[in-house]
Amino acid sequence: MNFSEAGVADVLRCAQRDESFVRDMQDNVQAIVKLFSSRKSHATQRIIPALTNAWYYCMTTLGNIQTLGEEYTGTLRFDKNKKIPSKTIELVWLLLYLGGEPLYDRLIHSLQNNIKNSHELTEEAQSVFLKILGFFHQHKQALKRIHHSLFYMDGKYYNISNRIMGVKYVLVREWLRDDTFTYSFKLLGQLSLFYILFNFIQQVWSFQSAGNIENVTHGSEVSRKDCILCAESRKNPCVTPCGHIFCWDCICDSLCYQHSCPICREVVLPNRIILLQNYV
């Protein structure tokens, strides 16, 4: 039986449905824990999202059952061979989905330690490799944004874990395909990718002209003061529980649509935002 690939709008609606259900489940679990102890509620704030996501996808995806989002949009998960992914692939996908970023950080840190302790590499070679690893560590958010731009352009892989494992969505019924905003999403992806690459090239060029190219791996001082949502200097800066800083109006507008940090996707409630006083 032939299936057609799901469009960008289909995949987005599927992901939003799943994320909405998991987020509601997280709020309920957090409320229950808070009833017993407010201290435990704060301590488990980082653990609950991982546990709820693991439970949800173990009960659905690993059990060869459609998630609520997949059932809502009439989609199925297929691997590179155009078949239902095996449980091994789905298990690895889930591990990458839940712990991909910490694993990435640990891998970079481990490689840096191995290079520093290596007796076979010259000091010059060690310096080059450390700069490369430092670049990939400091710019992991830019890599995420590049991935999202590619998703908007081709509509295949919503998460990086999907791209690594080759898991994409197909439609059970082709007539459900929504191509209304396909061109708009593609244009958005192209503009976003152009902006990311242009911004990076601009940073490299400015540091080269200043004779300080090494600082590229540590990030630009100007970019640190900019809000990632509006790309301008932060106005009334505030911080989320996960430690990311935004404009007050920008993050409040973002949380009206989705209760998660725009950078790390950790659950963030509007009443948890802290306005920074005398922040420079």
Image (cartoon, helix red, strand yellow):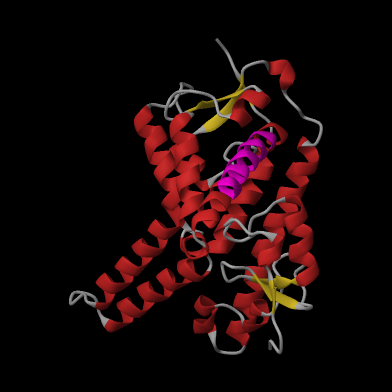
* Relative side of 111 to 42, left or right: left
Residue furthest top in the image: 1
- Of the 4 image quadrants, the one containing the C terminus is bottom right
Question: In this rendering, does residue 131 appear at all?
Answer: yes
Question: In this rendering, does residue 166 appear at all?
Answer: no
Indicate whether 18 appears above or below 202. Answer: above
Indicate whether 193 appears above or below 64. Answer: below
Residue furthest left in the image: 119
Residue 85, image x and y in percent? 43, 27
| Main secondary structure type of the part rendered in magenta | helix
Towards the viewer: 7 or 196: 7
Indicate whether 59 appears above or below 52. Answer: above
Q: Residue at x 50, y 71 (%)?
A: 138
Q: Could you say which quadrant of the image residue 153 lies in?
A: top right
Towards the viewer: 256 or 145: 256
In reply to whether residue 24 is colored magenta, the answer given is yes
Q: Residue at x 58, y 13 (%)?
A: 2
Residue 128, image x and y in percent? 38, 76
- Of the 4 image quadrants, the one containing the N terminus is top right
Magenta region: which residues?
13-28
Count all numbered tags in the image, as a single digit.
0
* Relative side of 153 to 25, left or right: right
Towards the viewer: 207 or 179: 179
* Relative side of 187 to 49, left or right: right
Towards the viewer: 227 or 245: 245
Q: Residue at x 45, y 47 (%)?
A: 51
Residue furthest front in the image: 36
Q: Residue at x 72, y 24 (%)?
A: 177
In reply to whether residue 174 is colored magenta, the answer given is no
Residue 27, image x and y in percent? 60, 49
